[in-house]
């Protein structure tokens, strides 16, 4: 069983996101469903997913655990920008 969720957390507040993520986790454990989640809310993805594939303009730039992807220099550059990533903050 496979279920694709595309931006289901758009316009949800934190409590609603947690409710959706709890439902996904419950369905995964109870029904054995594999989920592919396309999402821009990093908090949701980084805290609940076991494997992540990061894309930049349709090309895969990283794949791995949340920690591996978060630490990947190409992901940092694509999502934070090289200036922000190297300076430690916005100027």
Image (cartoon, helix red, strand yellow):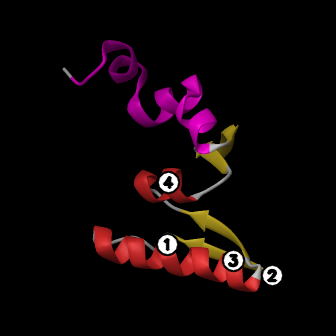
At horizontal 33% and vertical 22% (from top left) the residue drawn is 84
Marks 1, 2: nearer the viewer: 1
At horizontal 59% and vertical 74% (from top left) the residue drawn is 25
**Which residue lies under the disc numbered 3?**
29
Tell me the CA gap for discs 3 and 1. 12 Å
Marks 3, 1: nearer the viewer: 3
The region drawn magenta spans: 66-90
The quarter in which the C terminus is drawn is top left
30 horizontally vs 41: left or right: right
Q: Earlier in the sequence, mark 3 or mark 2?
A: 2
Marks 3, 2: nearer the viewer: 3
Numbered circle sitting on residue 5: none
Is residue 23 visible from the viewing direction of this image?
A: yes
**Which residue lies under the disc numbered 2?**
1
Main SS type for the magenta part? helix
Is residue 41 visible from the viewing direction of this image?
A: no
Tell me the CA gap for discs 3 and 2. 12 Å
**Pointer 1 with pointer 4, Cβ within 8 A:** yes
**Which residue lies under the disc numbered 4?**
47
Disc 4 crowd, CA 10 A, few/some/many (<14, 14-19, 20+):
few
Query: On screen, 80 above or below 65?
Result: above
What residue occupies the far top of the structure in this picture? Answer: 87
**Pointer 4 with pointer 2, Cβ within 8 A:** no
**Which residue lies under the disc numbered 1?**
21
At horizontal 66% and vertical 43% (from top left) the residue drawn is 65
SS class, disc 4: helix
Query: On screen, 15 above or below 72?
Result: below
Q: Quadrant of residue 40?
A: bottom left
At horizontal 56% and vertical 23% (from top left) the residue drawn is 73
Disc 2 crowd, CA 10 A, few/some/many (<14, 14-19, 20+):
few
Disc 3 crowd, CA 10 A, few/some/many (<14, 14-19, 20+):
few
């Amino acid at each position: 069983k496979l279920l694709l969720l595309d931006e289901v957390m758009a316009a949800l507040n934190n409590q609603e996101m947690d409710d959706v993520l709890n439902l996904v986790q419950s369905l995964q454990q109870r029904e054995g469903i594999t989920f592919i989640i396309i999402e821009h809310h990093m908090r949701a993805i980084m805290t609940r997913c076991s494997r992540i594939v990061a894309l930049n303009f349709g090309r895969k730039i990283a794949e791995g655990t949340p920690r591996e992807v978060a630490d990947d220099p190409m992901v940092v550059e694509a999502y934070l920008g090289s200036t922000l990533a190297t300076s430690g903050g916005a100027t």
